[in-house]
Amino acid sequence: MTKDFENTVINAVNNYPTPFYIYDEKGIRDVARRIKAAFNWNEGYRNYFAVKALPNPKILEILLSEGMGLDCSSLTELMLAEKVGAKGELVMFSSNNTPGSDFKKARDLEALINLDDITHLDFLEKEAGLPELLCFRYNPSNVIQGNSIIGKPKEAKFGMTKQQILDCVGLAKEKGVKKFGLHTMVISNSLDINVALKIVEALLELASAIHNSHSVELEFINLGGGVGIPYKDDESAFDIEGYSEGVKELVEKKLTYMPSIYTECGRYITGPHGYLVAKVRHIKRTYKTFIGLDASMHNLMRPGMYGAYHRITVLGKDNSTSTELYDVTGSLCENNDKFAVNRKLPKANIGDIVVIHDTGAHGHTMGFNYNGMLRSAELLLHTDNTLELIRRAETPDDYFATLLK
Ligand SMILES: Cc1ncc(COP(=O)(O)O)c(C=O)c1O
């Protein structure tokens, strides 16, 4: 975090109650431009930002203005896309176990529809009618091992087998579908371009099989998201330019035509440009020392759910002077409500401001209300250095709003 951003956080803490999320517009725009530039060899390239990563209209508007589309997975995410004026080919609908109502909304918005299962072809036809263009989600089985976030592809609930996709294309053609796309999403938070390129190779082999068996040239190939960010100090950033170059080489080698290349990155775009800011509420010493924050796992589920690592700093204290070993906790009645376990940090005091880094994706959005906890506010630092509240904190009234008398 730069000194300037640190000052922004101090200013924010003076004006808004903790905990809150704060996002950096400049950082988000810079990475949006970088990924676009990396794929500039492909005329139709577009990243469909995975709305689930940071579903705030203000952020989605920024990304749309950078030429991105939106990847939605549910009715309400489609409604969010509609709210910010995205429709047609700017919206990709990648869902699973999908209700008919969601397909209807996707059709209303003329979104690109990505089917997760062969049986969804008839289901979509019956519920909402078939569009002219359909995309299918491929599960390339044991091409890679997977990880704790997404699991092994072969055991994952997502996508179809190679044969099912070949059958789907044939069936859809018979039903009058004219254009096709292909999609996969089997990596998550991967920093290794070789793993990512293995998936691309498998996708392109399937694209080539589709071409051979059905004479179909795909309109686009969506490589999915899952591009990682270095959450830890000793990790290296994903080489997006090297990845793009590798994709280009593979497309030229495996296909006789050039489809548009799409990606669906969420974390890579906003992850490093969001911070969860909280205050030290209590310090408890038993067999270990616990820093109790005014944020809990319901504000950021990743550490509790996946054992995910997030850098933590104490404002105004240098981590290189870390002398203490802490568990950094919240207030939930769950022992995995810990942002960090056995973390070396500078000596903390009650009232200190603690910043949890790289929480701009899959952070606030995974929030929940267990123990009657309330979701926090979200703030955005604009490029002109103004600070905007882009989501208020929940109040007890919000918590009670869904209860009947
Ligand atoms: C279908 C799909 N696309 C894209 C993403 C975005 O992943 P990431 O934010 O890791 O890029 C996800 C994440 O769960 C997903 O399920």
Image (cartoon, rainbow, N blue to C red):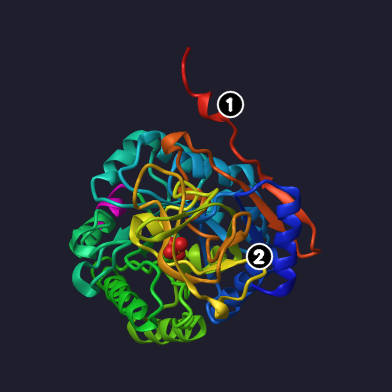
Question: Residue at position x 68%, y 63% from top?
Answer: 25
- Residue at mark 2: 66
Counting residues from the start of the chain, the first of labels 2 and 1 encountered is 2
Identify which amino acid the numbered label 1 is placed on.
Asp
> Which residue lies at the image location 54% right of the left edge and 78% below the top edge?
39
Residue nearest the viewer, comparing 249 with 294: 294
Residue 222 visible (yes or no): no
Secondary structure that dominates the magenta span: helix
Q: Residue at x 33, y 62 (%)?
A: 149
Figure quadrant of the N terminus: bottom right
Viewer-closest of 72 and 374: 374
Q: Secondary structure at mark 2?
A: loop
Mark number displayed over residue 363 = none
Q: Which residues are magenta?
A: 170-175
Residue at mark 2 to residue at mark 1: CA–CA distance: 37 Å
Mark 1 falls on what kind of element? Answer: helix
